[in-house]
Each structure stands twice: as C-alpha cells, then as structure tokens.
Amino acid sequence: MGRIIGIVHRVKQLKAGEARPTKVWIDSGSGYDLETETDELDWLLGRFPVKFRAVAKDEEVKSAYPWQIVKDKDGTAKKIPIEWDGLKAGDTVVMCCGGSGDRLAYAIARRGEKIGAEILRLAPFRLKYERAGNNKDNDRQLLVFLYAKRPELFQQTGSRDLELIRVREMYFGRQEAMAARMGCAQRLSQRFIGSIFLNEEGNYPEGILEEQFDRVRASDTILSLLAKEESRREKELKEAVRAMPVWQKIFEQLEGVGEMIAARLITAVGDIRRFENDSKFKAYLGAHVLADGRFPRQRNSELANWNNEARQALYLLGDQFNRRPDSVWGRRLREYKLKLRAKHPDILCQQCGSPWESCPNKKTHKRIYSDGHIHRMATWRTLTKFAEKLFHDWKRLEGEVEVSAKAAA
C-alpha cells in the first residue's frame, strides 16, 4: 500500500510579511513546505529536494537540477541536494476541493493517471467540523488522519472535476483578454484626444471626435489583435460550458441564461459539494436575507463577505428575468412585484415613516417603496428562490454523476 499525503495549498505571496507556502504531510510522520510554484512542480515530478549537503571548498558543483542549488548572495554554491521526494506510484493525495489548490489538484490528477497515483478531495466545511475549533496549522495532518479513519468523506477527483477546473481557467483567461482589450482602447482614446487638443499648429479637425476615433480604433493593429484574442477565448469558453452536465441538465433549460452567465456562476461556485446547505450557498452568492429581513448590500460598517463574481452573475440574471416576463422566472418576478406592492401600497419616507408627499425634508430624507424600490426587492426575492432551486438541482445532479461513475466502475 502506498503513502497517504495531505496537502494544504496556499497562495504564494507575502501577506503582512508572512510567507505562505503549500504544506505537505506524509503518513509516515514527515512533512515539508513548498515555498514556490517551482517547488510545487518539482514535487509533482518527484524531484523536490528534501536533503542537502554542504559544498566542499574548490568543489566542482554539478547538479541534475541547477535551480535547486543553494547559493549565497555572491552566487557561490553553498549546498546541493542529495535526496528528493515527490509524487510516486501508489501515492494517495488528499486535499480540500475548490480554491487556489485547483490547479495543483488538476496537475496531480493528470500526473497520477500516468504513474499510478490518485487524488481525493474533501469538502471544506467537513474539514472545518473535524477541526473542531482548532487552528488551521495542523490541517495537513488532519487530512491524512481523516482519510485513514473515514475515507468515505473524500471524493475521487475525476474527469468532471478536471473539466470544471479547466472551465474556470478558461473563464479567467477570457476576462483577462477582455480587460486587456478595454485597457488598450482606453489608452488609444486618451492618446487620440491628446493629439487633438495638444496640436502645436492649432489645426483642429471639424466634426464629431467620437466618429473620428471610431476610424482610428478600427485601424489599430494591436487593438484588433486583442479583440480577436478575446473573441477566440470566449468561443472556446462557450464550447467548454456547453459540454458540461450542469449546463445540459440545468442552465440550458432556463430562458435568459446564456453560456457567459452560466460560466460566471460555474466559475464562482466551483464544486457545489463544498457547500453544506442552501443557506451557506445563498450567503456565498449574496442572495441571502439578513436577520432583520433586509437583503444584503454594501453598507458602511457591514461585512460584504459574498463572492463578487457570483453576485454580479445574479444581478445580470435578474435583468434577464425582467426582460423575459413570460419566462418561468420572469413570471415569478412579476408575482413578487404584485405581492410587495399589495403589502406596501404607498410610497413612504424612510426616516419619517409618513407618506412621501407629506415629508418636510425631501432634500435630505429618502423614500421607500417606490416602483424602483419594489422592483429591486422583487428581483432579489426572485434570485433568492432561484439560488435555492439551483443548489438543490445542482446537488442532485452531482449525486447522479457520482452514482453513474460508481456504476461504470
């Protein structure tokens, strides 16, 4: 039987002066840190150095992996590795699903297919329960312990998980391409305006500047290439989304939900199995209701701890429901509008509580239950119900996928 290896992945950056390495623990009782992405790659390929020796004076230093030689500030070799470790045949790697570790999990799964290793992952909320209030410093050991005692808590990282990780990467790639294209267009616009107003000869063109800029923008080579890259990445993303079971079984059936909104939600949610219940799921999306009955929004002194990408997707989705009043969720939105207007027939002053028309301080006070306010309330009530149904449908789908995968095995 091979080794059990617990890995807690962390983003490689300095936070308040603290290094954040990825932490590895082996069931034999040893562990080490992977401080950089290069270390992670070396570990994946079984060549991470775990033991060094000092370099003798005037020794001719030779190493199969030159980047692993420890040098002083002058570039003189001080230590060279003599023992290596990493993913081996027969190993079982255990991690948490979702988050920054997805890329490493993907690589371990692909590498494991070639050498005969496997990776299983655990929902974060389960690890939190098993941690029982202790700090996170021992999570890597806890993962190994849990797998040894309760392996049923872990799920195999299969083709569906790898597909999800790829879609997330493709979505981020498309967003980066879009940001690059928009940034280029903005710089081009500022340069064009500057060339007009800073003309030393004082020869200013006639006509609408925006129309003249459109011609400049259409002829710019760099902007054109960036637009093509964005288009290509978006096309690839849509194709990848359409191949996913969650699109075919859930999102495709919903009028108003296109591939891009679905991709945004899929990317933000990641693995639905990491959410314990629909309450946690709604809170993550920002579609929950606060203790006082209000819907959450960014207010002073209030924590906005939802996922911005997911909440933005819901906002766009609510607009689509409003534009399609005869769709299933469009009708639900209209029903909530009627109910809320019946409950709040009058426009009131938020501060005075009196009818808005009789408020003496209209310049400083705010009105509530206007048509716009009722629309926003109904939209978020609809989105809350949508999030609940999405959670249960998605959970059910994952259950079907797991059952079918076991049956195929």
Image (cartoon, rainbow, N blue to C red):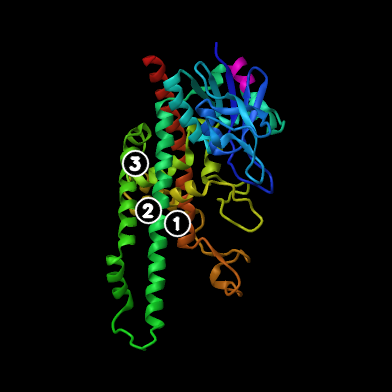
**Label 1 secondary element:** helix
Asked if residue 339 shows in the view, the reply is: no
Residue under label 3: 254
Identity of the residue furthest to the right in this view: 134
Q: Residues within 10 Å of mark 3 (few under 14, many from 20)?
A: some
Q: Residue furthest front?
A: 58
Query: Which residue is disc 1 drawn over?
Result: 375
State left or right for residue 224 relative to residue 82: left
- Mark 2 sits on what residue? 322
In the image, what residue occupies the spot 34% across and 41% down?
254
Between marks 2 and 3, how big is the CA–CA gap?
14 Å
What amino acid is labelled 2 in the image? Asn
Which quadrant: the N terminus?
Answer: top right
Question: At which x and y percent is residue 94?
Answer: 56, 24
Find the magenta span and give its range.
144-150
Q: Are the residues flagged by discs 2 and 3 in contact, CB closer than 8 Å?
A: no
Quick check: 210 above or below 63?
below
Tag shown at residue 31: none
Q: Residue at x 47, y 56 (%)?
A: 376
**Disc 3 residue type (three-letter):** Leu
The first of marks 2 and 1 along the sequence is 2
Image-quadrant location for residue 204: bottom left
216 falls in the magenta region: no
> Picture coordinates of residue 78 (x, y %)?
66, 36
Q: Which tag, 2 or 3, sits closer to the chain's start?
A: 3
Q: Are marks 3 and 1 in contact (CB under 8 Å)?
A: no
Residue plotted at (41% across, 57% down): 180
